[in-house]
Image: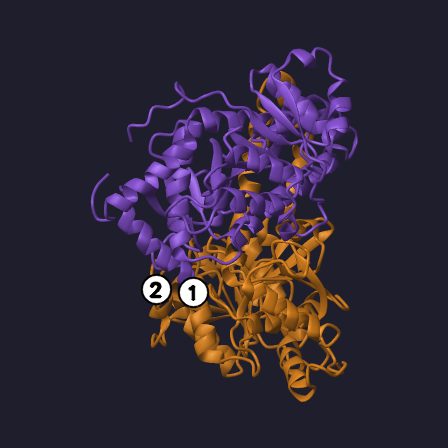
Chain colours: A purple, B orange
Amino acid sequence: MSAEAGASAASLPIALDAAGGDHGAPPNVEGAVLAARGGVRVLLVGDRVALHAELGKFQGSAGLPLEIVDAPDVVGMDEHATDVRGRSGASINVCTRLVKDGHAAAAVSMGHSGATMASALLTFGRIRGVERPAILTHMPARGGMTTLLDAGANADVKASYLVQWARLSTVYLKVLEGRDNPTVGLLSIGEEDHKGSALVLEAHALLRALHGNGINFHGNVEGRDIFLGTTDIVVTDGFTGNVVLKLAEGEARVMFGWIRDALNSGLKSRLGGLLVRTSLRGLADRLDPSTYGASILIGVRGLAFIGHGSADATAVKNALLRASRAHEGRLLPRLEAAFGEQGAVPAAAGE
Amino acid sequence: MSAEAGASAASLPIALDAAGGDHGAPPNVEGAVLAARGGVRVLLVGDRVALHAELGKFQGSAGLPLEIVDAPDVVGMDEHATDVRGRSGASINVCTRLVKDGHAAAAVSMGHSGATMASALLTFGRIRGVERPAILTHMPARGGMTTLLDAGANADVKASYLVQWARLSTVYLKVLEGRDNPTVGLLSIGEEDHKGSALVLEAHALLRALHGNGINFHGNVEGRDIFLGTTDIVVTDGFTGNVVLKLAEGEARVMFGWIRDALNSGLKSRLGGLLVRTSLRGLADRLDPSTYGASILIGVRGLAFIGHGSADATAVKNALLRASRAHEGRLLPRLEAAFGEQGAVPAAAGE
């Protein structure tokens, strides 16, 4: 891999779907202001009048690298993903079009996830050699975080998709997190090679054959390994991945509720609770999804980041910083090169 | 449903695979002593000499309803599930044979899960109308617990299996937990009917059609709903179910580690930690899998319970009590009746 990161990348702005998400413009605009103060150029895409009004609430915002791009339409959270088709005025479509036309480096949206995926796929197309894009997300783990994909873009998959996602995520972790040779685990129901579904057995054989050729394959991992941080990356189908993501969020939420209750039961616990509050808040922050801001839709020929509908300004800011780093690190050409190399070099040959 | 619970059921003993599990005889024998003190008759199956020696450690055990049944062989934790075939002297095979021959009410094992499943399936066969047995397990949830199946017996499934498991688990919760009309959720990646894998869409349609006919179908649920306790039962394939179970265990373990660390960081937290210790221990107990002791292999024509290899005496005791309750509640004939009724009444007709 000879691509040089950063230096020569033009400083294009990030296109933010400022109308998207459960709370509309406010957290988007505030997040953009925070990112802009950190030096990231942002295009705020949405209703011009509303965004101007929102932006006016921030003192000194006129001097920041922020621009408004008008988009009269928005795909509502209750619409179908396919409703994004043909709506050229919808904010998410304006964002992806800005990227496609070279006016923006990446599209970021806290709006309708399905619509964002559809818009990115329709506008950007796929990287050559990638059959389906996947949602790559991060989960808290002992010792840091585990990268999980697919977190929900593809409910039904083929073994070859999993292999492509292993390759894509390896490049992603190198560029975004500086990991040299990240390990890849295949999610299964037993560590032994012969355990798992028919899909997993097939993917296991393919990944084993490619070990060392752009993929550092560890072998099968189990559900517990995601939190134990056994491997840097865990690949799975989008059905299992989405269940995993939502289960983990639900468990953390319910466990924190139980802890709160436990610390409110009796005078002794209440007193102790006051003393440990700060430490436990630090733990809650560690589990907070806003740390990573957004997940990337990886495998499309353009940068697209998808966040939680409930994202706050911090999540929006972190998503914009992450998108900017992906662009500065030349993530897209490096992903394409990884597949170009794969195309030129047969699986049997070394890296 | 006219079957009367309890009264007429003969008080058969429970056959315990006393050689099975990571720690061999000690926790099995201690658990059996505890259960026997609670009035449950137990057959301790394993090496006669070793079990006699172990049992001798408990004062007054001679007066308890415990008997030793010799089994010279044991399927090791590192063997293959299929190694159970043809080994008539293996402790798990002796247990299932005792049940089959009417000498015991149920088989309970903390040993090799796959071997226990294989032994039960080979010896008991399947309930008529059930294509595949499933592992039914319990997970902690807000407001109590959620029943999950399949927890790992079938990595690849058909939609019809999920429907049969919904029916089996409904009867199980009625008999074992006294739930009148338990709700069934189908694990998916969106609550909307049209979301999910091809398998889930097919199962959804079948369950929807059977709603009210022995199945109280709630609709799709997501990963988070398992901990939120949205439905009494969650049905899924054995791949997803096993990932869910192990992820939940791993997350709880890692989160408790983080809480411990947080309570050890600095003087103030350490002092607070001492005060809240008791309350938090109560929470840990709530998440302890030994509460339920073991999971049932449901769908076979006999009662078989499968526990953690790492089970302690409490888990063994609870598994034996649970097995006894299943027998006293006439679980097996009631499961068979539920499928008999289904066979007689077409899906379209009412209950």
Question: Is B196 on the left or on the right of B96, as rendered?
Answer: right
Who's the residue at 70% across and 34% down the image? A19
* Image x and y of residue A224, in percent: 49, 46
Who's the residue at 62% across and 49% down the image? A85
Same chain for mark 1 and mark 2? The answer is yes
Tell me the chain of label 1.
Answer: B
* Image x and y of residue B84, in percent: 36, 71
In space, the residues marked 1 and 2 are separated at their CA atoms by 8 Å
- Amino acid at pointer 2: His
Instruction: Tell me where residue A7 sits by quadrant.
Output: top left
Give neighbour class at mark 1: few <14, some 14-19, many 20+ (Cα, 10 Å). Answer: some
Comparing A41 with B191, the one in front is A41
Who's the residue at 69% across and 13% down the image? A62
- Amino acid at pointer 1: Gly
Q: Can residue B323 be seen in the rendering of this structure?
A: no
Label of residue B114 in the image:
1
| Up-down relation of residue A154 to residue B236 (above or below) | above
For the C terminus of chain A, the image quarter is: top left
* Image x and y of residue B274, in percent: 65, 26
Label of residue B80 in the image:
2
* Image x and y of residue A89, in percent: 67, 40
